[in-house]
Amino acid sequence: MADSFQQHRQDLAAEIGSDGIALIPGGVETIRNYDVSHEFRQDSDFFHLTGFTEPEAAAVIVPGHPDGDYHLFVRPRDREQEIWNGHRHGVDGAREHFQAVAHEVAELEKLLPQLAAGRSVLYHRSGSPAHDRMVEKLSEKARDYTTRTGLPMPLTVADVRPLLSEQRLRKAPSELESLRAACELTAMGHREAIRFARPDLFEYQVQAAMEYVWREGGSSRNGYPSIVASGPNACILHYVENDRRLEDGDLVLIDAACEVDYFSADVTRTFPANGKFTGPQMAIYEVVASAHRKAVHASRPGATLRELHDIATREVTTGLCELGLLPRDAEDSMAMHHYREYFMHGTSHWLGLDVHDAGSYRVEGKPRTLETGMCFTVEPGIYIDPEREEIELSLLEYDYYEWSDRILLEGPAARAELDEAKKEAGTVRHPVPQEFRGIGVRIEDDIYISPDGHENLTAQVPVDPVEIEALWEEASWLPRAGA
């Protein structure tokens, strides 16, 4: 992938021009307890530009600088530290293996003003206290430097993230290859989890079977904390305790994926712990599966993620009404957003180096159209609270997107205004059928936009309930404790 990193730096250099300089900090280790750190993973933007995976580094991009366009600041070699904590590339290794003008990281504060001399704009991503202080000091020096020398020094600090987000939104061939590998390995793990799961196992045991497949297949890290949610836990969107014992009659919702070359998949499947859907479970599952299928089918160049969400939402809403989970017809339920009682999240998000990847969802205020090279998820769901016997819904018809924007911009005042409008419109109460309470279903696949349509990168994991039940019947590759 070395060529990709170089291309990303060249693209950023072209964006900021000869008048700009970009400072991109790497990630830092954080302490878990005493002298033990949390597992380190490099910052995604920094990795996107450098491929360098050690902590406490920084990159500076200076287009046209006589000493070189690309400067990498790294920790020095240190024999004692390397005995305890592992090999460091050091300055020589950074120069040899990462095609950089390399320096020790302690030199950054001294060299940054020299690199910035003659530049008017500093592109930076705030959030690293040490680097933020350097930028502040540089800004303080800039006015005096310009006055005394007549040469520019960055008086303007701009956010580099929008530029990098646009780069990361479209996957190069080598990046798609890594993402496809992550998706294929993730799919293998999900298939094994379905084979392995049985009543009386704990959620973490099913998790272990799935993650064993990933490690054995070459992935050293998950893309995010695995969700293995059985029974009522499937109604908790970000459940991660994974410590409940599976019971006969449960559904098991697994939302989990691995990384390959820092690229993460994102897959969810829902299946019966005992291998057979009950009637109510099947009814909810088929609604979600239909929404998933229609949204995936509509994925193509020129479409938008909002359109896919609207397609999935209408299908979910229609199904909820037909099953007696909502009091009004589908049109009213859509206009009043009653579906949000059971389907409260979006249908899609970008996918790549981060599981919720970089990239804006609108351009000039309008939903972004999908283009070749973009990757995202499709993940409709229905979650029916096991403890709610009755729901109360507002009768207000309103534009959900318009109000979401207002709340984002205006904060609590807009939220209070919407709440008051809902109160004035009145409410309707509706019982939740007992047979559906505690059922949670989500189905999620990873989609790549191709020139003539799309590719489902995770289609190897079945969605059809008959195929899921057949997969459950297959022998697991792994032994179960006590079996």
Image: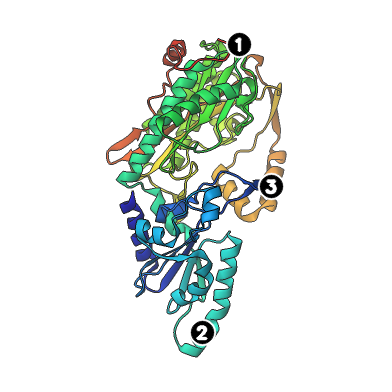
Q: Nearer the viewer, residue 314 or 201?
A: 201
Q: Nearer the viewer, mark 2 or mark 3?
A: 3
Kindly state the secondary structure of the residue where label 2 is placed. helix
Give the x, y percent position of residue 72: 43, 63
Reading the chain from its start, which is encountered first: label 2 or label 3?
Answer: 3
Q: Is residue 428 left or right of residue 168?
A: right
Q: Nearer the viewer, residue 231 or 297?
A: 231
Q: Nearer the viewer, mark 1 or mark 3?
A: 3
Which residue lies under the disc numbered 2? 145
Local packing at callout 3 (Cα closer than 10 Å; few below 14, some 14-19, many 20+) is few
**Snapshot colouring:** rainbow
Q: Nearer the viewer, mark 2 or mark 1?
A: 2
Local packing at callout 2 (Cα closer than 10 Å; few below 14, some 14-19, many 20+) is some
Quadrant of image for the C terminus: top right
Local packing at callout 1 (Cα closer than 10 Å; few below 14, some 14-19, many 20+) is some
Reading the chain from its start, which is encountered first: label 1 or label 3?
Answer: 3
> Which numbered tag is attached to residue 34?
3
Which residue lies under the disc numbered 1? 248
Quick one: which residue is furthest to the bottom in this view? 148
Q: Residue at x 55, y 54 (%)?
A: 80
The amino acid type, in three-letter code, at marker 1 is: Asp
Reading the chain from its start, which is encountered first: label 2 or label 1?
Answer: 2
Give the x, y percent position of residue 295: 42, 32
> Which numbered tag is attached to residue 196?
none
The amino acid type, in three-letter code, at marker 3 is: Tyr
